[in-house]
């Protein structure tokens, strides 16, 4: 049987809700059906928003749903040095640059992405500076201790990959938000020069996630359609880092009675609240449409 490794990779920034349950059950069920494995990974690089009690809640809720995962669970905050090394590799190739701009400056200079449902108000497409910053200015800002983020330079990526840049493809075995399916040409330009290391975190969701998928041998990335657009960038990172390329299976997002997708703020929809109100795991499956 071909190897099948997928993962459920929540961020412990709140209790899991019905949308998470749907995502977890989808990934675990796919692994079961394929005779493979579903890993659990804790994506907690944002130390200002993540809390240990939410991580504990993830284990509690998933176990209550009847799910089991291999130990040890990878917790991203324990591996920040590995993401720094990945970033350093990109830096040595001249593929990333320091960006000192504030959020407001970026917003003023950027176009808004037509639709990146997962990135909310932050879906800004920054196409990069007209001219690279001079070494003197950069040195001066560093000396002043100004904070900076590392951004991926699409211009440099294009130069590094040559004709391969426009030929990058990925396989969507599920469905993107506009019905995208099958072999898809990666268009990282739709995301612009993305931040790979945040000013406050030293890495980013994109870098840590793609790094770990490669490290953990993930063959199938199963996740919500809100992350479909990120896949264009993830495919590029895999090409730049010579990381293996998985198959993606994006699933629809669960919506509540109001037609809106579940969010952390919907406290009543947390698995904890449902359990306390007397729900059984099968009720969750039913409410998730499974
Ligand atoms: N940690 C991400 C989230 O909570 C999911 C990452 C992924 O599945 O690629 O939405």
Image (tube, rainbow, N blue to C red):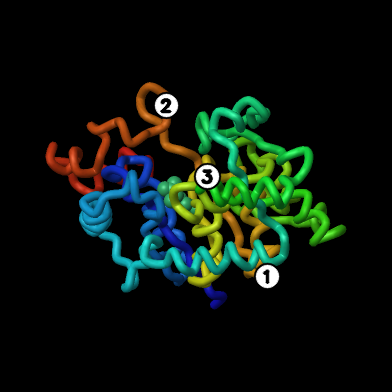
Q: Position of residue 183 (x, y in %)?
A: 72, 53
Q: Return the residue at label 1.
A: 242
> CA gap, disc 3 to disc 1?
32 Å
Q: Which mark is first along the chain, 2 or 1?
A: 1
Instruction: Report the front residue among 189 and 96.
Output: 96
Instruction: Report the front residue among 11 and 66.
Output: 11
Q: Which mark is first along the chain, 1 or 3?
A: 3
Residue 72 lies left or right of residue 130; in this view the side is left
Give the residue at x 75% y 46%.
132
Residue 261 lies left or right of residue 122; in this view the side is left
Total labels: the figure holds 3
Q: Is residue 114 visible?
A: no
Give the residue at x 72% y 45%.
133
> CA gap, disc 1 to disc 2?
38 Å
Element at badge 3? loop
- Specify whether tag 2 is near ligand 1 (CB below 8 Å): no
Q: Is residue 175 above or below residue 2?
A: above
Q: Return the residue at label 2.
A: 260
Residue 73 lies left or right of residue 80; in this view the side is left
Instruction: Report the front residue among 42 and 284.
Output: 42
């Amino acid at each position: 049987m071909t190897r099948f490794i997928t993962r459920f990779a929540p961020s412990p920034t709140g209790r899991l809700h019905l949308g998470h349950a749907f995502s977890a059950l989808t990934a675990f069920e796919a692994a079961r059906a394929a005779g493979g494995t579903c890993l659990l990974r804790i994506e907690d690089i944002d130390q200002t928003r993540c809390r240990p009690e939410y991580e504990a809640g993830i284990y509690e809720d998933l176990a209550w749903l009847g799910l089991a995962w291999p130990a040890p669970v990878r917790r991203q905050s324990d591996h920040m040095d590995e993401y720094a090394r990945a970033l350093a590799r990109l830096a040595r190739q001249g593929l990333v640059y320091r960006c000192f701009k504030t959020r407001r400056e970026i917003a003023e200079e950027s176009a808004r992405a037509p639709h990146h449902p997962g990135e909310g108000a932050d879906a800004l497409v920054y196409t990069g500076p007209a001219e690279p910053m001079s070494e003197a200015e950069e040195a001066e800002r560093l000396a002043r201790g100004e904070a900076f983020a590392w951004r991926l330079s699409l211009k440099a990526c294009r130069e590094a990959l040559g004709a391969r840049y426009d030929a990058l493809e990925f396989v969507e075995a599920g469905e993107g938000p506009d019905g995208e399916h099958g072999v898809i040409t990666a268009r990282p330009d739709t995301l612009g020069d993305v931040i790979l290391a945040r000013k406050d975190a030293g890495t980013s969701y994109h870098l840590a996630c793609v790094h770990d998928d490669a490290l953990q041998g993930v063959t199938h990335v199963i996740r919500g359609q809100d992350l479909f657009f990120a896949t264009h960038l993830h495919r590029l990172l895999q090409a730049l880092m010579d990381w293996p390329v998985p198959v993606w299976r994006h699933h629809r997002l669960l919506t509540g009675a109001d037609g809106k997708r579940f969010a952390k703020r919907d406290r009543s929809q947390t698995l904890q609240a449902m359990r306390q109100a007397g729900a059984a795991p099968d009720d969750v499956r039913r409410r998730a449409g499974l």
